[in-house]
Each structure stands twice: as C-alpha cells, then as structure tokens.
Image (cartoon, rainbow, N blue to C red):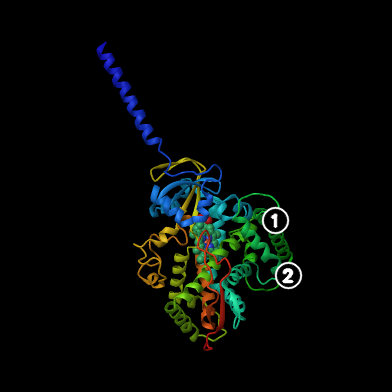
Amino acid sequence: MALFICLAVLVCLSAALLQWTNLRFRKKVLPPGTLGWPLFGETAKFLTRGPEFMKARGARYGRFFKSHVFGCPTVVSMDPDVNRYILMNESKGLVPGYPQSMLDIVGNRNIAAVHGSTHKYMRAALFSLINPAMIKDQILSNVDSFVRSHLASWEGTIVDIQKETKEMAFLSMLRQICGTQPDEFIQEIVPEFFNLVLGTLSLPINFPGTNYRCGVQARRNIVRMLRKLMEERRGECPSPSPRPYDMLDDMLRTDDEYKHKLSDEEIIDQIMTLLYSGYETVSTTSMMAVKYLHDNPVALHELRREHMEIRAKKKAEDPVDWNDFKSMKFTRAVIFETLRLATVVNGVLRKTTKDLELNGFEIPKGWRIYVYLREMNYDQCVYPEPLAFNPWRWLEKDGERRSNNLLFGGGTRVCPGKELGIAEISTFLHYFVIKYRWEEIGGAKMRKFPRVSAPNGLHIRVSSYSTPT
Ligand code: HEM
C-alpha cells in the first residue's frame, strides 16, 4: 500500500513538473510596454514626438516593446539582430503589414500586399522591368533626356527644390512606364497622384472631404486613365508605330517568350506600385542631397569634380550612360549618406499571420511589428560622429555592405528599385552640379519625422555654374 502511495505521489509530481515546464515554455509573455488609450493607443505621441518617443520607450522597456499605433497593437523592434531576423523570415509568419488605407489605394495586388508565391511572381515581373540590364539598355537614356529638359530653364530663377524633385520623381517614372504623354494627360494625372499619396497616409475613414476618400477617388480616376491607355495600345493594329521603349508595352506583351504575363488588374497595381514606391524615396533623397551639399562645400566640391571629369570626356549632348553611372563612386556615397542622415524610410511594417515567439516573447496573431530602422543609422559604433554628413565613410572597405545597412530593406523584400533610384538621383545631381550653383534663401525649416519634408518648401536661387556670383 505504502509503495502504491509513493508511486502515485511520484507520478503526480512528475505530471505537475511536466505541466509546469510546458506552461513555462509555452506561455511566453507579451513584450513590455503599454498599449495606451483604448482605440487611439499611443498614436498621437508617436506622431508628435517621433524619435524622442521611441528613445524614451526604449530607455524604459528595452529595444523590443509593445505599443498601440494607427489602430493596431504593435510591437516596436529597435534591435538590429531582431530586425534582420524579421526581414529575413517572412515565411515564418511575418508578412508585410501596411495600413489598410495604403492597400485600398495602391491596390490589393500591389507587391506589398501579397506574399508567398504571388509575391514571388509579382516581384519577378516587376524586377524584369527595372533590373540593372534594363536600366543600362533602356531606362538610363530616357531618364537622362527627361532630367536634362526638366532642369534646362532653372538658370536665374528661384526654385522650390522640394516641389521640383517631387514632380521630377513622379514624371520621370511616368515617362518610363508609358512614354511621353500629351500635356492634358499630365495635367490631369499629377494632382490625382498627389491626392492618392495623401490618401495612403490617412486613417481609412470614408467620409466626404477626408484624405482617404480623396485618395480612393484619385485611384479610381487614375485607373480609368490607365485602362484607356491600355485599350489604345491594344487597338494599335496591326502593329504599333515605332516609338521608344516603355514599360507598358512590355507589360502588355502576349508573345510566348514573355514570361511575366499579368492580368489587367495586376498590370494596373504594378504601375501603381512603381509610381508610388519610387516617388517619395527618390524625391526626398534628391532634395536632401541638395540641402546637405549646400551645407557641406567640401563634399559639393568633390561631387562636382567627379561630374566635371565625366563630362569632360563627353560631348555636351551625350547622355549619361551605364559606364558613367558606375564610375560615380562619390555620388553614390553622397546618396547613401543622405539616406542615412535624412532617413526616408524610418521603418517597415510586418504583421503576424499566427501566434509566434519572437525575441523570447509571445506575439499574438494579427499584431503589427514596426521594424524601426532609424536608430540603426545613428549608431555611433558603426557610424562615428553619426550626426556629421560624411559621404567618405561609404567609400571605406565594405561601406555599403555593412551588416546593419538596411537603408533599402533586407531579405525577400529588399528594394528591387535600389539601382533605379540611385541612377535617377545620380543623373539629377550630374546635371544640377555641372550646370548650376545655388544658394538657399529664407532659411528653410526642415522636418525629419514622421516624414522628411520642408513644410514651407526649400527655396534656392539658381545661377549658372560658369557665371561668377
Ligand atoms: C532612394 C530610393 C529608395 C529607397 C530608400 C527605398 C527603400 C525601400 C525599402 C526600405 C524597402 C523595403 C520595404 C519592406 O521591407 O517592407 C523597399 C521596398 C520596395 N521598393 Fe524601394 N526604395 C527606393 C527606391 C525605389 C524605387 C525607385 C522603386 C521602383 C520604382 C522602388 C520599389 C520598391 C518596391 C516595389 C518595394 C517592395 C518590394 C517587395 O515587397 O518585395 N523603390 N524600398
């Protein structure tokens, strides 16, 4: 009997121990932090205090904490290793988690809205249009002629470089997509596109007058314009009159050799993706490069020397070609340093598709993860004197390949437009510095968060470089 009781106690103890062990390892806790007010969470603090809010929360809870922003419980990760893990492991249930307003407006077949095999397919189709070979053979000469004509008449004028770089980034991409269009088309699509962008950054409240409603309407109008363009292209029988290459002709190809056939809806969302992804990134970086070069004459001198040397080997009318672009080492360094300091992409968003464990914590299904990249750009162990504009640091060995350089993202979603964006900005800088000198007027106020912008514009007085000032 005593033996039986001992055995029973032993079995009960083992079962309890097993259960306790299971619970201990299975039921992990949520990350530290606070969810703030019901519904609104900590959105207002996040938007108004931005980096300080992040720093304060980080100091209190560590580099991995929970919050509640833009209507969703969100885990903020500021830990470089965890950030890299998240970006590299989409298949473990960490898919993109961009806001509903963005998906509604840019389209639910846009590359950031899809994952798994659909993402692979859409990404391959998109990359076939903007990969380095296409930049070399088709895109660069087109960008060159666009930038040249856009900048032609700046001499002796006052230019709002923020407005100009926005227009340039959009119109240049539009031209790559559907060639030169009549003025009426441009005048109609430009304001629609600007409304579309505003809508993607709003709460999805569908009332008259809200940015969201205007954005949805703008999408509808742009889709109508694109459908008409596609019909016209298809109606060009029996074969189109010869015209320079553009991406739309490629996307509409039906021949057997073409591997990336898409439905009309997919083509439309692919165009929206191209227009949207390359817009603010390229325009803001171009504007901020002008700003940093203005404030750092030694860097400007070095950049101009690089471009003068390239131009000296060419005739005035020769376009920038692939070899020129590849030789622009200092320009590339200026672009990386500008991206680092002005941090155009503060972070990227992911969403959990199941309950999962991350960094030792439980993250419930459906939560957002804000992979906060900004702080990594200011890490003084990696970037000594992190607040100084120092393009030379990118010329050091492995400059661009630093493991914590996530300026263009990482993993399966690493930016497919990286080289195109750099080529566009480099071409702009080429013509800008060889033709012009400039001075800022009015001491522009700059904002760095939540988006980099000059709230009242960034005005510069432009004069010919060859004319002494
Ligand atoms: C200076 C310029 C640019 C910067 C800093 C930049 C940055 C980024 C970053 C950080 C991501 C990762 C987003 C994520 O993980 O969720 C990304 C993705 C993406 N970028 Fe860029 N980008 C730039 C230019 C461009 C251009 C010119 C294009 C195309 C026209 C482009 C198209 C895309 C697309 C389509 C994605 C999504 C890729 C995917 O989900 O697979 N980007 N970019």
Circles 2 and 1 in contact, beta carbons < 8 Å: no
What percent of the width, then of the height, locates residue 294?
48, 76
Q: Determine the residue located farthest toward the top in the rendered image.
A: 1
- How far apart in space, not on screen, are marks 2 and 1 (Cα)? 19 Å
> Is the residue indicated by label 2 positioned so its CB lies within 8 Å of ligand 1?
no
Asked whether residue 211 appears in the rendered view, the answer is yes
Q: Is residue 374 left or right of residue 165?
A: left
Name which of mark 2 and mark 1 comes first in the sequence.
2
Image vertical order of residue 437 relative to residue 2, above or below: below
- Near mark 2 (Cα within 10 A), the count class, few <14, some 14-19 or many ≥20, is few
Kind of residue at disc 1? Gln
- Closest to the observer, 455 or 376: 455
Tell me the quarter of the image containing the N terminus.
top left
Q: Is residue 15 above or below residue 417?
A: above
- Residue at label 1? 217
* Identity of the residue furthest to the front in this view: 442
Vertical order, 3 against 270 (above or below): above
Instruction: Characterize the local packing of mark 1: few (<14), some (14-19) or many (20 or more) Cα atoms within 10 angstroms.
Output: some
Q: Nearer the viewer, residue 47 or 93?
A: 47
Outermost left residue: 2
Give the residue at x 53% y 50%.
43
Q: Position of residue 88 (x, y in %)?
A: 44, 53
Task: Give the number of the disc on residue 184.
Answer: 2
Disc on res. 327:
none
Under circle 2, the secondary element is helix
Task: Give the amino acid type for the residue marked by disc 2 in the picture.
Answer: Glu
Residue ID at (29%, 21%): 10
